[in-house]
Amino acid sequence: MQQSVEQERIKQKFIAARGYWRPWTDAILKLHPDFLERYAEYAGQPARKGPLSPRMVELVYVALDTSSAHMYGPGLATHLKGALSAGATPFDVLDVLHLVATQGLEVVFACASILGQELGSQMQDNRQSLAIPTGEEFKAAYPVAASLIETLAQFDPEYAQLVTDFIQFGGTGKGLSTSERLLVQIALNACFTAFNPDAVRLHIRAALKNGLSASEIFQVIQLGAHLSVHGTALGAMSLNEIIESFEGQRNESQ
């Protein structure tokens, strides 16, 4: 489309703030440029102003876009390129994908805990005999699993051991540090697409114990909020298609 000087200014501002330009941004630039400018400022600020490195910010975005609660391919491609350009390694990315694969276990842990509470005295307490060995490194990096794995073992000890092994050894051992793992897990559980307040609390507690600052933790929480614009992108594209269809019909009738 033919763009005015003002629209071109907003487009360049958006690209500088967000690092991409897509068909949905073109549609909104045509229909509502003020939205696009304000969104660029709102969504760009957490990545730009916080204490986390560009590498870590992009890895968090990779986690959020690959999460089964979101799965946004165009964003993933953008942020994979951004992460590698900012110094992330393939091992970093694979460790992020490992954490994404374990995200569904948060619900299994929570539901096993609820089931145990509801059974109450009907449930035999055999945690001593079913203890799953986990080291301090495991407890530091995966606080939710470490706190609830024995509850899981009371229902299915074989499954609990397999879960522990997958969590403990499914990563590369060459990528993310314990602190970085905690930040990614906070981001995954704090995002509106899969909000899990109990898991967020345990991961934040472990992150603070591991020396992470409140500002680092709050930054990864902020990064998930503007993923909701992907719904806006879908709506904008549909609206633009319908408007163009109406305009085409009108032109044919004239």
Image (cartoon, rainbow, N blue to C red):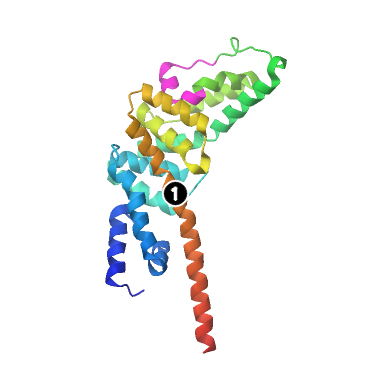
Which residue is label 1 attached to?
227
Please tell me whether residue 63 is drawn above or below residue 40 in the rendered image. Answer: above
Q: Badge 1, how many Cα within 10 Å: few under 14, some, many 20+?
A: some
Secondary structure of the residue carrying tag 1 is helix
Q: Quadrant of the N terminus?
A: bottom left
Rendered location of residue 39, percent (x, y): 37, 55
- Is 17 displayed left or right of 111 in the figure? left
Identity of the residue drawn at 56% across and 13% down: 131
Rendered location of residue 136, percent (x, y): 42, 16
Q: Nearer the viewer, residue 128 or 48?
A: 48
Identity of the residue drawn at 45% across and 34% down: 99
Please tell me whether residue 43 is drawn above or below residue 10 in the rendered image. Answer: above
- Is 246 displayed left or right of 56 in the figure? right
Rendered location of residue 170, percent (x, y): 46, 30
Query: Is any part of residue 196 visible from this angle?
Result: yes
Q: Which residues are magenta?
A: 132-145
Q: Farthest residue in the bottom direction?
A: 254
Q: Nearer the viewer, residue 78 or 18?
A: 18
Q: Nearer the viewer, residue 200 or 34?
A: 34
Q: Amino acid at mark 1?
A: Leu
Please tell me whether residue 167 is drawn above or below residue 88 in the rendered image. Answer: above
